[in-house]
Image (tube, coloured by chain):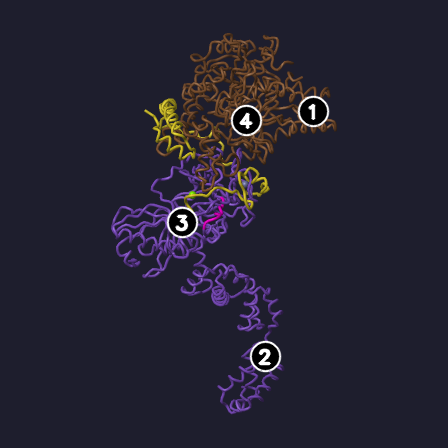
Chain colours: A yellow, B purple, C brown
Amino acid sequence: MSSLSRDDVAKLAGLARIEMSEEELVNLSNEFTVILDAVARVQEVAGADVEPTSHPLPLRNVFRADVVVPSLTPEEALSGAPAQEEQRFRVPQILGEE
Amino acid sequence: MTLSYDDVIAKYEPVLGLEVHVELNTNSKMFCGCSTVFGAEPNTQTCPVCLALPGALPVVNEKAIESTIKIGLALNCSIAPFSRFARKNYFYPDMPKNFQISQYDEPICVDGYVDVEIETDEGPKTFRVEVERVHMEEDTGKSLHVGGATGRIHGAEYSLLDYNRAGIPLVEIVTKIVPGTGKYAPEVAKAYVAELRDILRALGVSDVKMEQGSLRCDANVSLRLIGAEKLGTRSETKNVNSLRSVERAVRGEMIRHAELLNAGGRVVQETRHFQEDTGLTRSGRSKEQAEDYRYFPEPDLVPVAPDAAWIEELRATLPERPSIRRKRLQEAWAVPDKEMSAMINADVLDIVEATVLLGSDPSKARSWWLGEISRIANDKDVAIADLTITPQDVAEIVALVNAGELTDKLARQVVEGVIAGEGKPSEVVAKRGIKVVNDDGALMAAIEKVCAEQAETAEKVRNGHLPAAGALIGAVMKETKGQADAARVRELLLGHLGQGN
Amino acid sequence: MIRNSASEMAAKLAAGETTSVALTQAHLDRITAVDADVHAFLYVDTEGALAQAAAVDAKRAKGEKLSPLAGVPLALKDVMAQKGVPTTCGSKILEGWRPPYDSTVVANLKKNDVVILGKTNMDEFAMGSSTENSAYGPTHNPWDLTRIPGGSGGGSSAALAAFEAPLAIGTDTGGSIRQPAAVTGTVGVKPTYGGVSRFGLVAFSSSLDQAGPCARTVLDTALLHEAIAGHDPKDATSINAPVPQVVAAAKSGDVKGMKIGVVKELNGDGYQPGVRARFEESLELLAKAGAEIVEVSAPNFEYALAAYYLIAPSECSSNLARFDAMRYGLRVGDVDGASAESVMNLTREVGFGKEVKRRIILGTYALSSGYYDAYYGSAQKVRTLITQDFTKAFEKADVLVSPTCPTTAFKIGEKANDPLAMYLNDIATIPVNMAGIGGMSLPSGLADEDGLPVGFQIMSPVMKDERMYSVGAALEAALLSKWGAPLLDKAPVLGGAR
Ligand SMILES: [Mg+2]
Ligand SMILES: [Zn+2]
């Protein structure tokens, strides 16, 4: 039966970058038991012979010409920035890979 | 405690894998119309698309597709009749959407190869490096780390982000594993990247400047005991920013792995960073816990399905393969192997060819670029390409020498002047007042003056002791500030002293 | 004046009987009078709207040739980027964000001189069927303020039903235009996928989202449809073909000889008796108007809901990753020594509501390694099967029809804690999005048991949108002559004066 433990949900929340309280983790884990049962029905009819559809229309080769168009001004680009400095987006320290 | 390289290869067989990222030189970005010009003011080349503002959508740059197909063809790949973009999901502040549009299980080019020739103990030998895939993706923005020590991430208090580079088209070229190189692994790795760079440059699809990051190499290395089947654990070394570093990084990793294995330890699968100063690698993020990128087909883009006609059209534009071109040039220029290698190693082939095409004879062009100009570049510790002197300048200088208007010695002064920024060769000649003294009258005056000053020496020559003439010629040359043609001076001097013929 | 249809307003403007400024002011006054009760709007752009209206009036005074809807006011769903105007998507995470650019829909509206009154309420990032998931409080159904106006575009549909605007823009990922239209007694159209540009529509589920017109009459939706539709080079999934002739179809309303297919699976158990009664009655009217009613079967539709609740969350988990506190929007936890990662985590915890988090986690799971094939992959196969069902059904019928939703508007709070019950609302609308075809909902009367509006859904093949307008117009005319007055005349009076 499809289900997600509290720890599974915690791992997914980590991947999705959402902090979650213990209560939220447990609640979601309970809800998912029901939801996953419902959505797992797709497996009943999805045979190997069926092609997946990722896009509703059979469009191909849609391109734009390699032409430069005006960018935003830096003021516009930074207009929503929670913090900025030296015409750059200021963000908290980045941990991890260099 | 450090193992020698010979110890390593006596016991282990290295297996290589190389991933090269190439920034294409399109005018606009991969998925938006922002300019790609290098070095612009921060965040002046951004728009809703490459900043990932809510609601913005990507549209594929056709030129980037063409360039990628050309790369695939040049690397002997098959071009997929149907390929798709996929989203690679992970959070990182330099990547605005928090996913990279890349390609996953449906890349545009697959199954190619590059033959590279290296010098071995048994003479030149060709190694075939098989290419698994060539796919399209997009570059990230650049972060500036503020606070802490050296602008590194560690110890930084915060970071400043510039998204000008975000969305510049990247092509990733991934090799299959390369076994069987034995002790030549570092050379093969270097030669592969060099060959790739030459091919890409010849295609005109990228600036291929390793130092500016438009060509970046990740070198994967693993070791296994000689004769063993199973592959060892690999490390992935990033940040390898020059051809020399590729070689050093592979060699360094081979030694590091061997030391670990000999001590009974194990190699950790991880990303490592090459450090230019020490030639060693430093541990980056451990990949023990594999990333889950949750790839899925990019729903905002439609598949790329190039038809045969388009592919053939692109194939028809492919330039001569660099290795074939080298053979052709070597024959045309009648250059021995050793000097050809010297030119290739010094990376002057293009510039010599350009000079020859401007009228210089091959041997003169070669000797200027490989000799005097290389020496000056070395002294200044810059690349030849970064000097102000051009093939046009060198061709002009060679022509002036051929016309007898410059001596070799004077020509060196002109080269110096051009490199010092004094202008074109003709301008340097004019400004410095450099000219060959061709006026026999002026030369005779100098000869008479010198013979009078050094009457005793002159007398010796007059009496048939010809070696003594050297001192007189030197004095005349000095008198004419080196601008005289020494051969003419000798001729006139000997005639003056009754030794002409 | 505000109870007129948009085309009647346009006619009065053209005849010089009123001005756009007067018309706009009348709607702004109406908003002031009733929106405290309805809460259809998140932002009213009084100045911008009046300035735009004055500009249209000036053009008209100069005798410039104007588009059919020039000077008519419109309510914009808050999921569309409009330059300089707050765009929140009903979420805390975007509070205060003002886009530096116009969506293509907004650019087209401006080009057609349609006056934008403001931004309407919605379920956060369009995830919901009741507009209860807005971070800014629910919208109330003008038919009964204790009930939901549908969702996610409940603000737009309520604004129409409350006469706060004659036109509105909605977006429809699984029914977010059609279901709100159904429960408010208004008309809503989800055009063929790719018929209207998605550029500037803040993405929920990219392969399903489609913007479309909402109004109180079929002709008004058609006029708005033509104003916003067309190929857009900024949207790679936009169709490069002429816009279907929907206005002509809505004007003719001719169904003689048309085959109308009743989808067997979208009726029956689970559908409220009053909903079924109105549906049967509409079928009879269409038959009387000359259409041939046939039955078609779509056996895979029963899996549509399950597939939808995998595909949409998967795409949304990726689309909503950009809301990370780095470049715009809310930032939480940026204290000394905090890392970018912890700021992202905290911001997304505080900035997203419960339903959004639920779907992001579900989508993250469905795409994760080891589960992709079982969930996302299988859902995409179901999508293929549903599309095949439609193809077969359209071999037998020119359009397909069904009730828009199984029930009339439910009470606010009634299903808030039962996501599955909530999801069932969209059972009849979702297949349309899965196949990328067109869908319309128009009012077919009131359910006997609760006196609330019932929607009638018409589905047309890809880029044959004109067909649903023909059928919609025919049914609308037949119902109007039966009722003697527009259905909305039966709605309770809000805020005093009519
Ligand atoms: Mg990559
Ligand atoms: Zn851009």
Residue found at the very far front of the displayed protein: C336
Sequence-first tag of 3 and 2:
3
Q: Which residue is mark 3?
A: B238
Residue type pointed to by label 1: Val
Q: Chain of mark 4?
A: C
Determine crowd level at label 1: few under 14, some 14-19, many 20+ residues with C-alpha closer than 10 A: many
Q: CA distance from mark 1 to mark 3?
A: 63 Å
Residue type pointed to by label 2: Thr
In the rendered structure, does residue C255 fall within the stretch colored magenta? no
Q: Which residue is mark 2?
A: B480
Asked if labels 2 and 1 share a chain, the reply is: no
In percent of width and height, residue B139 lies at 48, 44
Comparing B348 with C22, the one in front is C22
Q: Is residue A27 above or below residue B486?
A: above
Q: CA distance from mark 3 to mark 2?
A: 59 Å
Given contact means CB atoms under 8 Å apart, are the residues at marks 1 and 3 in contact?
A: no
Q: Chain of mark 2?
A: B
Q: Is residue B426 above or below residue B41?
A: below
